[in-house]
Amino acid sequence: EAGVTQFPSHSVIEKGQTVTLRCDPISGHDNLYWYRRVMGKEIKFLLHFVKESKQDESGMPNNRFLAERTGGTYSTLKVQPAELEDSGVYFCASSPRGRTNSGNTIYFGEGSWLTVV
Amino acid sequence: QKEVEQDPGPLSVPEGAIVSLNCTYSNSAFQYFMWYRQYSRKGPELLMYTYSSGNKEDGRFTAQVDKSSKYISLFIRDSQPSDSATYLCAMSPGYSSASKIIFGSGTRLSIRP
């Protein structure tokens, strides 16, 4: 079974440009999460989709960030325009609907490393 | 003050040693405690979880929670070079949603052959 996949794995863009990150969750997982870790900081929650609906977007830092999950499958996270402080690693994670026998297990992708210069 | 404090290390120990990793926290509402392992350039992987206080053992790994002291630990026995990774503690008020998970900053662990 394929895990959570993210694209691109690395991206270097100039300040003011736009970047779109993509996440393909594990097949059948209704829950999809975006997290990020900026340099020297902890992993922080950004938002949570249940299928195509935004369940919780309380962690989105500002309106330069736009997340979508059309059709309830893959998700995109767009940063427009990018700022220097947006540099970091963006993780996507997914989990099946409801509580599993493994507790609140979420499965992370390898991350998309973003550098804004 | 951060909700979760974790010593970033790095921590380097010889193969076979017992490793102790720790986190402290300030929010008494946390009930669900997790340890993630993250290899270089990979995503975090859930290693163990415990609910409320107590111990949990899984092979060479033991997780301990002391809610009275707001202190959690992960012990690794007979450490192996393959255990070299960053270990993140994480916690939340409950199972309810991964959006409530608060992560520690991670401890880099290196096991010397």
Image (cartoon, helix red, strand yellow):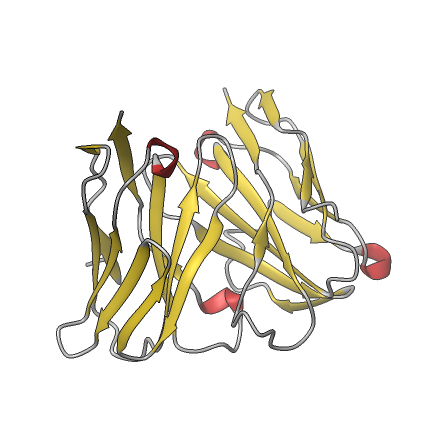
Residue A10 quadrant: top right
Q: How many marks?
A: 0
Residue B75 quadrant: bottom left
* Left or right of A65 on screen, residue A39: left
* Left or right of B16 on screen, residue A81: right
The residue sitting at the left extreme is B69
- Where A115 falls versus A95 (above or below)? above
Residue A21 quadrant: top right
**x and y percent of residue A84 in the render?**
46, 29
**x and y percent of residue A48 in the render?**
62, 63
Which of B89/A114 is in front? Answer: B89
**x and y percent of residue B1 in the render?**
19, 59
* Left or right of A32 on screen, residue A111: left
- Where A39 falls versus A44 (above or below)? above
Residue at coordinates 60% horizontally, 74% vertically from top-left?
Answer: A100
- Where B3 falls versus A10 (above or below)? below
Which of B20/A106 is in front? Answer: B20
- Where A103 falls versus A8 (above or below)? below
Residue at coordinates 67% horizontally, 29% vertically from top-left?
Answer: A8
The residue sitting at the right extreme is A71
**x and y percent of residue A50 in the render?**
71, 68
Residue at coordinates 43% horizontally, 41% vertically from top-left?
Answer: B38
* Left or right of B91 on screen, residue A32: right
